[in-house]
């Protein structure tokens, strides 16, 4: 199978390239194909003669999306529109990665694929527009929503992920302020990549949540990172309002892999187990 991975140098893109290393992978990032360039997307997709396209490319800096709304829309919405049109033209399934931040956060339990969206920030809004463009344009699609990604190759745009950011700050010994009233289901990029592989073998197109099992606040996530790393780091719990990030986040954006469970494909470990594997692999990589 020839697989075109777009956003291949990013956090999830890198794990997908590793996961599909036995196949013929064409790894493109912005240098090879800027997804906002409609003509180039058409040309490149025709040129690669791939069998499937996986798009992880996005404007992922959530706070910056508030200031750069037009640019975020260009990448997260119009970029997906361009990919969807090209995939339709060449009859190629398109796997597109979306986010837990398309939800509003008021539901007290994890969101399923059936729940209505209601983004509370520009990032979520532009990612939801990308989902809609894809649904509207091309039937052969998988929309896969992940959350709080941590992968061995840190996000290019952000230069880090939450686990790496905590470890770096913890090593410096500075007291930390971490948000205690926002909940999510963290996702190992490696586990996500494995399940994306399983899912695309089914040809069951649609929308899927793909997260590690369990729910935590950012505070609980940080505490578990330090516990598993054997570090004693003082943390002051704060509310999201006290923390004062430029972009509002949903209070609850935990997801449940309901659609994946219906296909009997949900073998995602808990986020704590996934974190353990990540920390071990990270240690090995550093040696
Ligand atoms: N990270 C998370 O916690 C998280 C949570 C929920 C959902 N997601 C979604 O998961 C997906 C993967 O996230 P990630 O953390 O792996 O992101 P990432 O590390 O930031 O990777 C995104 C990649 O896309 C590239 N890119 C940006 N604009 C592009 C364009 N116009 N054309 C082509 N490539 C472009 C980036 O290149 P440059 O770095 O050079 O700009 C980067 O290599 C995204 O769709 C994101 O919205 C992520």
Image (cartoon, rainbow, N blue to C red):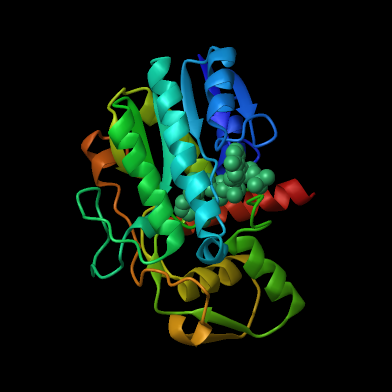
Question: Which residue is drawn at the image coordinates 73% and 81% (left, top)?
Answer: 173
- Decide: is 216 above or below 99: below
Residue 219 visible: yes
Q: Give how far across and how far down residue 259 sits, in percent.
A: 25, 41
Q: Give how far across and how far down residue 29 sits, in percent.
A: 64, 35
Q: Is residue 24 left or right of residue 265?
A: right
Q: Is residue 216 left or right of residue 67?
A: left
Closer to the camera, 232 or 136? 136
Closer to the camera, 267 or 263? 263
Which corner quadrant of the image does residue 226 belong to? bottom right
- Decide: is 286 above or below 250: above
Q: Is residue 262 left or right of residue 1?
A: left
Question: Which residue is drawn at the image coordinates 51% and 82% (left, top)?
Answer: 244
Which corner quadrant of the image does residue 171 belong to? bottom right
Question: Which residue is drawn at the image coordinates 52% and 40% (left, top)?
Answer: 56
Q: Give how far across and how far down residue 47 sits, in percent.
A: 59, 13
Question: Which residue is drawn at the image coordinates 42% and 32% (left, top)?
Answer: 95
Q: Give how far across and how far down residue 129 sits, in percent.
A: 37, 48
Which corner quadrant of the image does residue 37 belong to? top right
The number of callouts visible is: 0
């Amino acid at each position: 199978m020839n697989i075109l991975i777009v956003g291949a140098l990013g956090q999830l893109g890198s794990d997908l390239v590793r996961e599909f290393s036995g196949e013929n992978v064409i790894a493109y990032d912005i240098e090879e194909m800027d997804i906002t360039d409609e003509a180039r997307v058409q040309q490149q997709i025709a040129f690669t003669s791939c069998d499937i396209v996986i798009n992880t490319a996005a404007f992922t800096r959530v706070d910056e999306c508030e200031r750069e709304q037009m640019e975020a829309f260009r990448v997260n919405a119009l970029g997906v529109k361009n990919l969807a049109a090209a995939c339709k033209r060449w009859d190629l399934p398109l796997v597109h990665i979306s986010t837990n931040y398309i939800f509003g956060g008021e539901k007290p339990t994890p969101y399923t694929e059936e729940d209505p969206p209601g983004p509370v920030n520009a990032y979520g809004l532009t990612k939801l527009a990308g989902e809609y463009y894809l649904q509207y344009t091309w039937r052969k699609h998988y929309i896969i929503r992940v959350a709080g990604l941590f992968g061995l190759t840190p996000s290019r745009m952000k230069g880090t992920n939450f686990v790496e950011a905590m470890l770096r700050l913890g090593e410096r010994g500075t007291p930390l302020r971490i948000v205690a009233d926002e909940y999510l289901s963290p996702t190992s990029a490696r586990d996500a990549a494995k399940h994306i592989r399983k899912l695309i073998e089914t040809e069951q197109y649609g929308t899927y949540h793909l997260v590690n099992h369990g729910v935590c606040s950012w505070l609980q996530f940080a505490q578990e990172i330090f516990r598993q790393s054997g570090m004693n780091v003082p943390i002051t719990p704060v509310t999201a309002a006290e923390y004062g990030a430029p972009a509002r986040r949903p209070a609850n954006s935990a997801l449940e892999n309901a659609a994946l469970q219906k296909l009997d494909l949900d073998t995602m470990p808990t986020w704590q187990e996934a974190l353990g594997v990540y920390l071990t692999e990270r240690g090995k990589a550093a040696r």
